[in-house]
């Protein structure tokens, strides 16, 4: 497969057109961003770490029956993905309170959420990803009721698979963000799953091992990502 021009440059990844009309190449860069792109730094080995991490998780999800866009790892920082038409919302599942839910609802960090919460956010940095609900998605034609139902049910199914995978590695899956897209009309999981888009705490010490280390200036960001990868058996 031939890599052609960069079609889309996000904050941490780039998407390249290829000579195959059904596939893109997704490149993980070392750029690390937080607060809607206000804080950006280059962290050595991050592109490589997240590319391997994402490939490992996506293949685990695929084995468990989740339709995913990732197909093949072609270098330490690149993989072949299905060409999706993205639904412009982010799906967030929370097992434990942290981050924006604490600010928005005035609740303390670390509360067990049972059942886990599910929220939609509009993918728009300028508006700081505002929370939206089913009726906004339908009225503004970002997605159909059927797609909403599928995003919700797949997000919860993914929670069961990943909570268990991380639990076996001594980690709590606190929360995470997913993005879905359409491939020839079928809704499938897109974007990435890595410590950039989820919260993971050590089960015993509750040490943060995710992008909150970058957001909060705690240091040891990549070392934490690498530790998570090692614990779940993901080769880097
Ligand atoms: P939040 O606490 O900021 O709402 O984020 C919840 C989880 O979703 C957290 O693990 C970070 C992830 N997330 C992103 O990666 N990107 C985003 O734009 C948003 C809104 C959340
Ligand atoms: N992904 C968003 C950003 O880079 C939000 C975050 O992770 O804090 O700005």
Image (cartoon, rainbow, N blue to C red):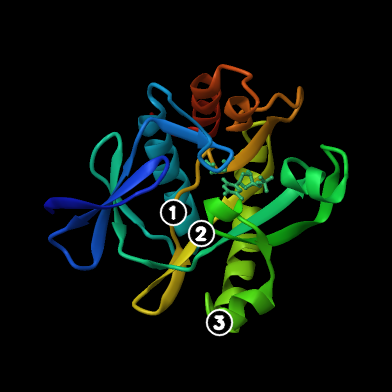
The alpha-carbon separation of the residues under discs 3 and 2 comes to 15 Å
Residue at x-position 60% and y-position 75%: 137
- Dot 2: within a 10 Å radius of its alpha carbon, few (fewer than 14), some, or many (20 or more) residues? many
- Dot 1: within a 10 Å radius of its alpha carbon, few (fewer than 14), some, or many (20 or more) residues? some
Left or right: 163 in relation to 230: right
Residue 25 position within the rendered picture, expressed as x and y whole percent measured from the top left? 26, 51
Residue 221 position (above or below residue 147):
above
Q: Quadrant of residue 121?
A: bottom right
**Foreground: 66 or 220?**
220
Q: Quadrant of residue 147?
A: bottom right
Residue 196 position within the rendered picture, expressed as x and y whole percent measured from the top left? 53, 38
The alpha-carbon separation of the residues under discs 1 and 3 comes to 20 Å
* Ligand 1 under 8 Å from disc 3 Cβ: no
* Ligand 1 under 8 Å from disc 2 Cβ: no
Residue 157 position within the rendered picture, expressed as x and y whole percent measured from the top left? 62, 62
Q: Are marks 1 and 2 in contact (CB under 8 Å)?
A: yes
Q: Which mark is residue 191?
A: 1
Q: Which residue is mark 3?
A: 144
**Foreground: 34 or 173?**
34
């Amino acid at each position: 497969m031939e890599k052609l021009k960069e079609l889309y440059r996000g904050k941490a990844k780039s998407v390249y057109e290829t000579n195959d009309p059904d596939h893109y190449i997704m490149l993980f860069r070392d750029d690390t961003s937080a607060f809607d792109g206000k804080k950006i730094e280059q962290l050595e080995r991050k592109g490589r770490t997240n590319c391997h991490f994402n490939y490992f998780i996506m293949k685990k999800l695929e084995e468990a029956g989740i339709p995913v866009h990732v197909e093949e790892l072609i270098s330490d920082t690149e993989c072949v993905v299905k060409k999706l038409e993205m639904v412009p919302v982010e799906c967030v599942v929370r097992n434990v309170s942290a981050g924006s839910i604490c600010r928005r609802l005035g609740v303390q960090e670390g509360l067990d959420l049972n059942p886990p919460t599910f929220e939609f956010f509009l993918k728009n940095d300028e508006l700081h990803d505002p929370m939206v609900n089913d009726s906004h998605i339908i009225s503004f034609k970002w997605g159909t009721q059927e797609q909403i139902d599928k995003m919700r049910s797949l997000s919860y199914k993914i929670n069961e698979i990943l909570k268990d995978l991380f639990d076996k590695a001594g980690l709590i899956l606190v929360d995470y963000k997913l993005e879905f897209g359409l491939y020839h009309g079928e809704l499938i999981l897109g974007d990435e799953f890595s410590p950039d888009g989820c919260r993971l705490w050590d089960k015993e010490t509750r040490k943060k091992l995710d992008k909150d280390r970058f957001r909060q200036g705690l240091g040891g960001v990549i070392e934490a990502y690498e530790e998570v990868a090692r614990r779940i058996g993901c080769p880097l």
